[in-house]
Image: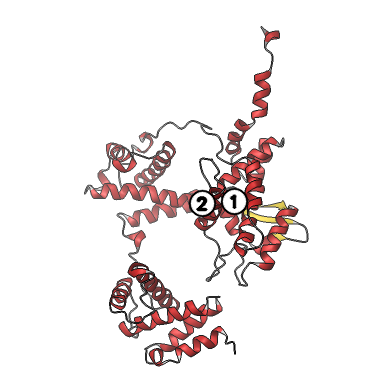
């Protein structure tokens, strides 16, 4: 007789090992929640053993919450003493076993509200974290910067503050030579021009704000020099349209992962959608009655709609009908294994990168953004204006589209073939 996943788990929880372990009801509630989320019974049973081993080691009945240090200590003990055969497996090794144990216990404690979300997490361990928090709130509130831009400011300013703090200097006495030393330090030695430019822009913004708040002199902010950036210095780094067609044709339509990846690649290449836009595309953004795709574009910060190309519509329909997990999530593209959350930016980039690499594409960068470049170049070759291409790609600044003017090689050849004799 075939048993359901719930019956299998219920049977395991009824064994003496689990019956004699504290907090059985709390563990069972969480484990059945995982089953409802789509996790396999085998994986959930493995987690139940890890949670039981932890519950035998750490008393969570007290008034306080459980810290990350307590979880790490329990993981080290349980793995060293092989608290249960499922807790440590020679096939994955100690490091992976420890990471798996810590992740399982942390997720459980968060679910039951017993994990101590430390105020001194990674973001707050850096010097002047309170100042950084105030600075970022100012940029979001007064300047309206998008989250990716705020993250860039955080990364580069924090990197400088760490470097500066290591020299035991007082921020109120920071000067231009301090910043210049950082920009020629060993860690900055291999940065590209554009990377240094982003760093300088972030530091200028920070020191301007720091001066307004009286944290430091800041009068030198505008004198921090970045390397010269040459407008439109490079060609778009995308594949040819022939290569794009080859890429799409290479993705099968039988395996679930192929069906999903094919739809992702078509959206990136035919519509030129950014990775973040594909990731955030929602089921209710597909208007099947009117054959439209509605999308919130991150850069111009507005909603746009596009006609649903037949081939793309068929690829999306196949994915939604046969592959997409049954879940309450509204994002179109999800992971195909539990938990069925939305694809991450890294995961989406990786799936395109791997398939391009498999075809041995010889282009500077592999990934979805290269397909965005290919889309723009193809539209230009089809006779669309730069304004039309910019609108299609969702460019907030028309100048962002100018670089594609350089790929109109047919027009350049016509200029080269022009006979100058009559003008001389």
Look at the numbered discs 2 and 1 and tell me whether their residues touch, using CB distance below 8 Å.
yes
Residue at the (37%, 68%) spot, across then down: 96
Looking at the rendered image, the quarter that the N terminus falls into is bottom right
Q: Which mark is residue 301?
A: 1
Furthest residue to the right? 289
Specify the quadrant of the image occupied by residue 110: bottom left
The residues bearing labels 2 and 1 have C-alpha atoms spaced at a distance of: 9 Å
Q: Position of residue 47 (x, y in %)?
A: 43, 78
Q: Nearer the viewer, residue 228 or 316?
A: 316
Q: Earlier in the sequence, mark 2 or mark 1?
A: 2
Q: Position of residue 261 (x, y in %)?
A: 61, 57
Q: Give the SS element for disc 1.
A: loop
Specify the quadrant of the image occupied by residue 208: top left
Q: Position of residue 53 (x, y in %)?
A: 35, 82
Residue at the (40%, 33%) spot, across then down: 227
- Around disc 1, counting alpha carbons within 10 Å, would you say few (fewer than 14), some (14 to 19), or many (20 or more)? few
- Around disc 2, counting alpha carbons within 10 Å, would you say few (fewer than 14), some (14 to 19), or many (20 or more)? few
Q: Nearer the viewer, residue 169 or 359?
A: 359
Residue at the (56%, 52%) spot, across then down: 355
Furthest residue to the top? 424
Let me know if residue 156 appears in the view: yes
Q: Give the SS element for disc 2.
A: loop
**Residue labelled with disc 2:** 146
Furthest residue to the left? 168
Looking at the rendered image, the quarter that the C terminus falls into is top right
Let me know if residue 308 appears in the view: no
């Amino acid at each position: 007789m075939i048993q359901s996943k719930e019956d299998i788990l219920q049977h395991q929880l009824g064994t003496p090992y689990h019956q004699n372990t504290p907090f059985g009801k709390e563990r069972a509630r969480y484990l059945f929640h995982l089953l409802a989320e789509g996790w396999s019974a085998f994986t959930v049973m493995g987690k139940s053993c890890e949670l039981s081993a932890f519950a035998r080691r750490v008393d969570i009945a007290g008034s306080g919450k459980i810290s990350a240090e307590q979880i790490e200590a329990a993981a080290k003990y349980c793995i060293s003493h092989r608290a249960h055969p499922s807790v440590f497996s020679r096939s994955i090794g100690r490091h992976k076993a420890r990471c798996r144990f810590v992740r399982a216990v942390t997720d459980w404690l968060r679910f039951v509200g017993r994990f101590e979300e430390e105020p001194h997490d990674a973001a707050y361990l850096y010097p002047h974290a309170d100042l950084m928090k105030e600075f970022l709130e100012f940029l979001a509130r007064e300047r309206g910067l998008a989250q990716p831009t705020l993250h860039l400011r955080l990364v580069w300013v924090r990197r400088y503050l760490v470097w500066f703090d290591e020299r035991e200097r007082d921020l109120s006495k920071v000067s231009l030579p301090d910043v210049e030393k950082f920009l020629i330090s060993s860690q900055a030695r291999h940065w590209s021009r554009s990377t240094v430019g982003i760093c300088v822009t972030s530091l200028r913004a920070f020191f301007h704000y720091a001066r307004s708040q009286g944290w430091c002199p800041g009068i030198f902010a505008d004198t921090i020099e970045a390397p010269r950036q040459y407008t439109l210095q490079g060609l778009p780094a995308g594949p040819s349209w022939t290569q794009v067609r080859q890429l799409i044709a290479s993705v099968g339509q039988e395996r679930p992962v192929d069906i999903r990846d094919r739809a992702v690649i078509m959206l990136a290449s035919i519509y030129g959608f950014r990775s973040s836009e594909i990731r955030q595309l929602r089921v209710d953004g597909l208007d099947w009655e009117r054959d439209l795709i509605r999308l919130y574009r991150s850069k111009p910060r507005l909603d746009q709609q596009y006609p649903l190309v037949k081939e793309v519509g068929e690829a999306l329909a196949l994915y939604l009908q046969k592959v997409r997990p049954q879940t309450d999530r509204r994002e179109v593209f999800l992971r195909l294994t539990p938990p069925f959350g939305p694809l991450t930016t890294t995961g989406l980039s990786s799936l395109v990168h791997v398939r391009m690499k498999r075809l041995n594409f010889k282009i500077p960068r592999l990934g979805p953004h290269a397909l965005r470049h290919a889309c723009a170049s193809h539209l230009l070759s089809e006779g669309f204006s730069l304004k039309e291409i910019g609108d299609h790609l969702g460019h907030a600044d028309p100048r962002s589209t100018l670089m594609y003017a350089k790929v109109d090689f047919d027009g350049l050849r016509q200029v080269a073939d022009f006979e100058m004799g009559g003008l001389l």
